[in-house]
Image (spheres, rainbow, N blue to C red):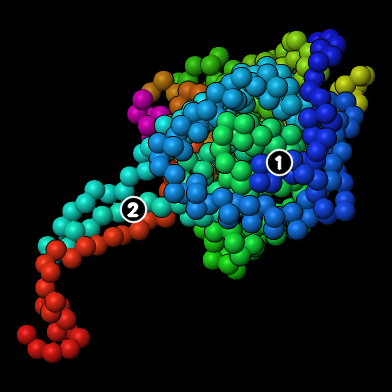
C-alpha cells in the first residue's frame, strides 16, 4: 500500500460554484439564516474547501412553503410531462458527469474512479429509470366487485416530502430520495448531511436547468437537531424519508409519529457474507475484499461479517488478507488510488477504537492502523481483517462503518445461517456456494432485504433496496418505491340509479 502519486490539480471549485450559498429554495441558491457557519472539508487533506451559512428553521419554513406552492402544478402535470422533464434531467446530469464526480470525490474522499464509475453513472441511470417509471403509476383495473358498483384504484401523490440523506453517498442518496418522489407527482425538501452538501445542490441546480419547475426540488443544508428535526415535524410535510443510523432513525420516527406522517426508514446494516465449503474460494475472497472496502467500508450494505465454513476458513482468511494488503491508499484524485480516507478524523478514530478494543479478544490479521507520512494529514485507515472474534462481540454485532471485515468459522449450514441472522440488522447479505439448493435455502432463510448469491454489492435501478428488522422499512429505487410516495384511493361508482337501495333497510325501513 502506498500513495500512488500527486493528485491532478483540477479538482472542483466549490467556493466559486456556491458563492450564492448552500441552500437551494424555489429555484435559486440562497444563504442560510441560522447565524452559524459550517465547513466542507476535504477528508483526504483536512483542508477546508467551502464555508457556508447553515440553514435555520426559517429556511426550512421557506423551503416547505416553496414546495407546497409548487405541488398543485407538478401533481397536476400529466405522467408524460413529468417523464419528459426527467428525461431532460438525465441528459443534463450526463453532460455534467465529470463535474459531479469531482465534487463527490472532493467532499467525501472517494477515489475518483469510484465516483466516475459507480456513483455518477448509477445516479444518471436512476434518473432515466424514473423518467420511464413516471408513466406507469396505474392502480388496479376497474371491476364490478359488489355487482352494483364499479370500483377502481387511483394512485395519487402525497404532497410535500421532507427527506434526510446521509454523508456516505450524497449524490446517490439525493437521487434515491428525490426521483421517486417527484416522478409520482410530489414536491420535496431534502436535507443533505452538512458535511457533504455539494452534489445535492448540484443535483437540484441540474433539475432546474432541465426545466423542472421552481419549488419542486428544494435543498436545506443544516444540522439534524435544528433543520432536520424541524423538517420532520413540519405540519405541511406529509411524508418523511430518512436514511441514516438506526439510533437517529428512532428519533425521526418519534417526531414523525407526533404528526401522523407517512414514514420511510433506511437504517443501519451489518451484512453477513456466508461462504459454504463448496464455494469458489478465489471468487469469495475477491468478493469479500471488494464488498467490505467499497467506499472505505462506509456503506450500510458492505460485507462486514464473513462466516466461512471450517474447511475453507484458514485459506479464506489468508487469501482475503493478501488481497487487502494489495489495496493502494492515496489521494482520491490520483491515478491508481484504490482506497480513499474515511469521511472525517472523528469517523477514523471511531473505527480505530473498535479495532483497538477487539485486540483483547480477537486476532487482527492485517491492517488495524492509520498510515503515516503524507497520508497522516487525511482520515485514512488501512484495510483491516479481524479473525476469531466471538459471535456476541462488539465487532460482530455493531455497525463499524469503516474498512473492517470480521471473519468467523462455522461448521454446519444450519449454524452458518443462524449466525448470519444473529444481529438486530437485516439490510443485505450474500451467500457463496456452487450448490443451487444450498444457495436457494440461504436466500429464503437469511432475513435481509437483499441477498446476493456469489456476489456482494451490485445494485440496479429496476430492483428495490430496503431492509428488515432494525434496518428499517420501505423501499428505495424500482417501481416498488412508488408504494412509499403515493397514496391509494378507492373510487366506487353506483351502477343501478336506484334511489332506495336494498342495503338502506339495515339503517331504516323494511324490505
Rendered residue at 37%/32% (across/down): 440
> Disc number at residue 381?
none
User: Could you tell whether 24 is left or right of 148 in the image?
Assistant: right
Q: How many marks?
A: 2
User: Could you tell whether 275 is left or right of 348 in the image?
Assistant: left
Label 1 to label 2, Cα distance in Å? 34 Å
Q: Which residues are magenta?
A: 436-443
| Whether residue 23 can be seen here | yes
* Residue that mark 2 sits on: 154
Front in this rendered view, residue 376 or 351: 376
Rendered residue at 85%/11% (across/down): 6
First in residue order: circle 1 vs circle 2: 1
User: Could you tell whether 178 is left or right of 228 in the image?
Assistant: left
Measured as percent of width and height from the top left, residue 341 is found at: 79, 27
The quarter of the image holding the N terminus is top right
Rendered residue at 44%/44% (across/down): 77
Helix, strand or loop for the magenta stretch, by majority: helix
Rendered residue at 81%/25% (across/down): 13
Front in this rendered view, residue 9 or 498: 498
User: Could you tell whether 405 is left or right of 448 in the image?
Assistant: right
Q: Quadrant of residue 507?
A: bottom left
> Disc number at residue 28?
1
Q: Quadrant of residue 434?
A: top left
Measured as percent of width and height from the top left, residue 316 is found at: 60, 20
Amino acid at each position: 500500500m502506498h500513495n500512488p502519486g500527486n493528485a491532478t490539480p483540477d479538482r472542483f471549485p466549490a467556493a466559486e460554484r456556491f458563492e450564492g450559498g448552500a441552500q437551494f429554495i424555489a429555484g435559486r441558491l440562497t444563504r442560510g439564516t441560522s447565524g452559524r457557519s459550517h465547513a466542507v472539508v476535504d477528508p483526504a487533506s483536512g483542508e477546508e474547501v467551502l464555508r457556508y451559512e447553515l440553514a435555520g428553521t426559517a429556511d426550512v419554513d421557506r423551503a416547505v412553503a416553496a414546495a407546497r406552492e409548487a405541488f398543485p402544478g407538478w401533481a397536476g402535470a400529466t405522467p408524460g410531462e413529468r417523464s419528459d422533464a426527467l428525461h431532460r434531467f438525465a441528459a443534463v446530469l450526463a453532460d455534467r458527469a465529470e463535474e459531479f464526480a469531482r465534487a463527490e470525490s472532493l467532499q467525501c474522499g472517494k477515489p475518483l474512479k469510484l465516483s466516475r464509475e459507480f456513483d455518477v453513472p448509477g445516479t444518471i441511470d436512476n434518473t432515466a429509470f424514473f423518467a420511464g417509471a413516471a408513466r406507469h403509476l396505474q392502480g388496479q383495473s376497474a371491476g364490478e366487485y359488489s355487482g352494483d358498483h364499479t370500483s377502481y384504484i387511483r394512485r395519487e401523490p402525497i404532497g410535500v416530502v421532507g427527506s434526510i440523506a446521509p454523508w456516505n453517498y450524497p449524490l446517490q442518496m439525493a437521487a434515491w430520495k428525490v426521483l421517486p418522489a417527484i416522478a409520482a407527482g410530489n414536491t420535496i425538501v431534502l436535507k443533505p448531511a452538512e458535511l457533504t452538501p455539494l452534489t445535492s445542490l448540484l443535483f437540484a441546480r441540474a433539475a432546474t436547468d432541465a426545466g423542472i419547475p421552481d419549488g419542486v426540488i428544494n435543498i436545506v443544508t443544516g444540522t439534524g437537531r435544528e433543520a432536520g428535526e424541524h423538517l420532520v415535524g413540519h405540519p405541511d410535510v406529509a411524508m418523511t424519508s430518512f436514511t441514516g443510523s438506526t439510533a437517529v432513525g428512532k428519533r425521526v420516527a418519534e417526531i414523525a409519529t407526533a404528526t401522523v406522517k407517512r414514514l420511510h426508514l433506511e437504517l443501519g446494516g451489518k451484512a453477513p457474507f456466508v461462504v459454504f465449503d463448496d464455494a469458489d474460494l478465489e471468487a469469495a475472497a475477491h468478493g469479500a475484499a471488494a464488498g467490505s472496502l467499497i467506499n472505505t467500508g462506509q456503506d450500510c450494505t458492505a460485507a462486514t461479517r464473513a462466516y466461512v465454513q471450517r474447511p475453507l476458513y484458514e485459506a479464506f482468511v489468508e487469501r482475503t488478507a493478501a488481497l487487502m494488503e494489495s489495496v493502494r491508499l492515496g489521494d482520491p484524485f490520483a491515478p491508481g488510488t484504490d482506497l480513499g480516507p474515511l469521511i472525517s478524523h472523528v469517523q477514523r478514530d471511531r473505527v480505530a477504537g473498535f479495532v483497538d478494543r477487539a485486540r483483547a479478544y480477537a486476532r487482527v490479521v492485517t491492517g488495524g492502523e492509520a498510515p503515516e507520512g503524507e497520508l497522516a494529514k487525511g482520515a485514512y485507515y488501512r484495510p483491516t481483517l479481524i479473525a476469531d472474534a466471538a459471535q456476541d462481540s462488539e465487532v460482530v454485532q455493531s455497525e463499524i462503518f469503516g474498512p473492517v471485515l470480521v471473519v468467523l468459522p462455522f461448521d454446519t449450514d444450519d449454524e452458518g445461517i443462524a449466525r448470519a441472522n444473529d444481529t438486530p440488522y437485516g439490510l443485505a447479505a450474500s451467500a457463496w456456494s456452487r450448490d443451487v439448493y444450498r444457495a436457494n435455502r440461504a436466500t429464503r432463510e437469511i432475513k435481509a432485504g437483499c441477498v446476493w448469491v456469489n456476489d456482494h454489492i451490485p445494485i440496479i435501478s429496476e430492483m428495490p433496496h430496503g431492509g428488515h428488522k432494525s434496518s428499517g422499512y420501505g423501499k428505495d429505487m424500482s417501481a416498488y418505491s412508488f408504494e412509499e410516495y403515493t397514496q391509494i384511493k378507492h373510487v366506487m361508482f353506483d351502477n343501478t340509479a336506484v334511489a332506495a337501495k336494498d342495503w338502506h333497510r339495515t339503517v331504516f325501513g323494511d324490505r
